[in-house]
């Protein structure tokens, strides 16, 4: 029998935080290291020794302490389409380009899903001293304190946070990004993790990622939703993923009408 009680999920959250502690120890030991080893993946994106080291360490811990749970990770794969039972979804370093350059806009994303639905989430951004977490039905926190989305109810008054401009150009959403940034109060490029966490904390009202995958959204979507917002996850649109949009909920329909983010890329 599957135990998804509140108490059981709190135990899983404690374990997820242990995983994040292990990840932070590895990432911060190599952050801004002059001898950091960086290689290039087949898609021409960078990957570091820290990405590999974190995912290996987390897989080993999960295998020892949760041997019946499946694992999907950015660097070493897994059955993305298999949605039955429990699985951990890991992005060891989301924002590797920032990590490589010594910028703080990166993080480790950890989610526990059941039947493809995120039940527990941790987003650790140790370079800026924050750890966000959520349990389905139990709210969201930042450094242990409850968080909630904003009450801004007009795009004209909103702060937009987004991933790289070049990414929007590549996937054909450049014009839509310009539209929303022209209409909003202000916009900032914060990358995937920090954009959606900003929405969860209420310091931005709209977060938009041009294209990403399951491991990029699994944790962030739950944190945003448990903070009272809404998250559109189109990562299943294709092998390269899809767009991801978070809002405070009040703006969601208006933002979709402007951005058309609910359509498949190229559709």
Image: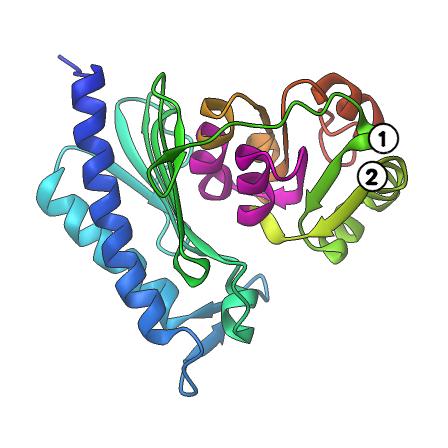
Q: Decide: few, some or many residues near mark 1? Use Cα within 10 Å; few <14, some 14-19, many ≥20.
A: some
Q: x%, y% of residue 4?
A: 22, 16
Residue stretch in magenta: 193-222
Closer to us: 14 or 87: 14
What residue is shown with label 1?
A: 156
* Residue 185 within the magenta-colored segment of the rendering: no
Q: x%, y% of residue 177?
A: 82, 42
**Label of residue 261 in the image:** none
On the rendered structure, is 79 left or right of 226?
A: left
What residue is shown with label 2?
A: 185
Q: Are marks 2 and 1 in contact (CB under 8 Å)?
A: yes
* Residue 197 within the magenta-colored segment of the rendering: yes
Instruction: Determine the residue positioned at 84% across, 46% down.
Output: 174
Closer to us: 77 or 205: 205
Instruction: Determine the residue positioned at 31% across, 60% down.
Output: 24
Instruction: Determine the residue positioned at 29% across, 66% down.
Output: 26
């Amino acid at each position: 029998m599957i135990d998804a009680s509140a108490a059981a999920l709190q135990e899983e959250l404690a374990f997820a935080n242990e995983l994040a502690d292990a990840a932070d120890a590895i990432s911060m030991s190599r952050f801004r290291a002059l001898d950091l080893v960086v290689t290039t993946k087949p898609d021409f994106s960078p990957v570091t020794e820290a990405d590999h080291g974190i995912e290996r360490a987390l897989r080993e811990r999960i295998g020892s302490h949760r041997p019946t749970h499946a694992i999907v990770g950015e660097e070493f794969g897994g059955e993305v389409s298999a949605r039955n039972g429990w699985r951990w979804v890991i992005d060891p370093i989301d924002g590797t380009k920032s990590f490589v350059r010594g910028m703080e806009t990166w993080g480790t994303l950890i989610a526990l899903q059941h039947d493809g639905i995120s039940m527990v989430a941790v987003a650790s951004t140790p370079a800026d001293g924050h750890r966000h977490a959520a349990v389905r039905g139990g709210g969201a926190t930042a450094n242990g304190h409850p968080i909630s989305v904003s009450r801004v109810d007009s795009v004209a008054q909103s702060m937009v946070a987004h991933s790289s401009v070049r990414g929007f150009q590549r996937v054909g959403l450049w014009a839509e990004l310009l539209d929303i940034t022209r209409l909003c109060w202000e916009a900032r490029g914060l990358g995937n993790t920090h954009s959606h966490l900003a929405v969860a904390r209420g310091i931005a009202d709209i977060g938009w990622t041009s294209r990403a995958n399951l491991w990029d959204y699994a944790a962030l979507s739950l944190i945003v939703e448990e903070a009272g917002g809404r998250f559109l996850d189109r990562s299943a649109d294709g092998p390269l993923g899809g767009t991801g949009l978070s809002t405070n909920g009040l703006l969601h329909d208006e933002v979709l009408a402007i951005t058309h983010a609910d359509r498949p890329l190229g559709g």
